[in-house]
Amino acid sequence: MPSGSAGRRYAQAIFDLAQEENKLEQWSKDLTAISQVFDQPQARVFLENPKTAREKKIQFTATVLGKQVSPQALKLAQLLVQRDRFAYATNILEAYTSMWNRLRGIEIAHVTTAIPVDEAEAKQIQTKLAAMTGKQITLDLKVDPDIIGGMVAQVGDTLLDGSIRTRLQNLRKQLA
C-alpha cells in the first residue's frame, strides 16, 4: 500500500517545478494520465509481476504514455516504475491537485446527502459553504441513505454534520 507522505513528497517536488516553469495545468493533465494508466487492472498486473524485467516495464510505460504526456512527466512515470512506486500515482495526483487548488483558493467540499440533490440545491449548498469558508468551493456530492436526512459536509479539516442520524444518536446519548 502506497504511503500518503511519500506521494505528497513527490507531489511537492512536481508542484514546485510546475510553478517554477509555469506549467501547473500541464502537470495536472500529465499526472491524471499517468494515474489513469497505472490504475488500469491490466497495467497493474503487468507492472506488479516480479517475473517481468524492469526494462520491459519501463518500455511499456514509454509506449503507453509517450504520446500522452510531456517528456518530463514520462521520466517521472518511468522513475516510479523503476523504483516500484507506480502505485503512488494516485496519491501524487491527489496531493498535487490539493496543492494547486489551495494556490487558486479552491476547496473541495465532500457533501453527503440522504437523497440526490438537484442542480439548484447543489448551487445553494456551494454558495453557503463558500460564504462560511471564504473560499471558492467545488462540490463532491455523494448519496448515503443511512444518514436518514440532512447532510454532512467536510471542507478541509472542518466537518459539518447536520444529519438526522447524528441528531438521533445524540438524543439517544442524552436519554441514556
Image (tube, helix red, strand yellow):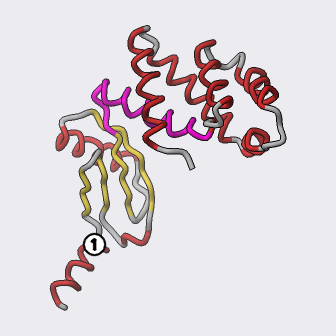
Q: Position of residue 148 (x, y in %)?
A: 36, 72
Q: Is residue 9 above or below residue 121?
A: above
Viewer-closest of 43 and 2: 2
Q: Tell me which corner region of the image, top left, top right, bottom left or bottom right, holds residue 113.
A: bottom left
Main secondary structure found in the magenta portion: helix
Query: On the rendered structure, is 91 left or right of 48?
Result: left
Q: Which residue is located at x 33 percent, y 45 percent?
A: 109
For residue 102: magenta? yes
> Residue at the spot x=26%, y=79% of the render?
168
Which quarter of the picture shows residue 38?
A: top right
User: What kind of element bears circle 1?
Assistant: helix
> What residue is shown at x 63% (from left), y 36% (from top)?
86
From the viewer's perspective, tell me whether residue 52 is left or right of residue 37.
Answer: right
The range drawn in magenta is: 87-107
Residue 91 is a magenta residue: yes
Q: Nearer the viewer, residue 130 or 25?
A: 25
User: Residue 34, relative to residue 25: is it above or below?
Assistant: below
The picture places residue 147, in percent across and down from the top left corner, at 37, 70
Can you say whether 110 is above or below 168 in the image?
above
Q: Is residue 50 left or right of 151 when viewed as pictured? A: right
Q: Which residue is mark 1?
A: 166
Q: Would residue 68 appear left or right of 93 to someone viewing this image? A: right
Type of amino acid at the residue the image marks with label 1: Thr
| Quadrant in which the C terminus is drawn | bottom left
On the image, the x and y values in percent for residue 152 come to 31, 59
Point 74% across, 21% down: residue: 62
Dot 1 alpha-carbon crowd within 10 angstroms: few under 14, some 14 to 19, many 20 or more: some
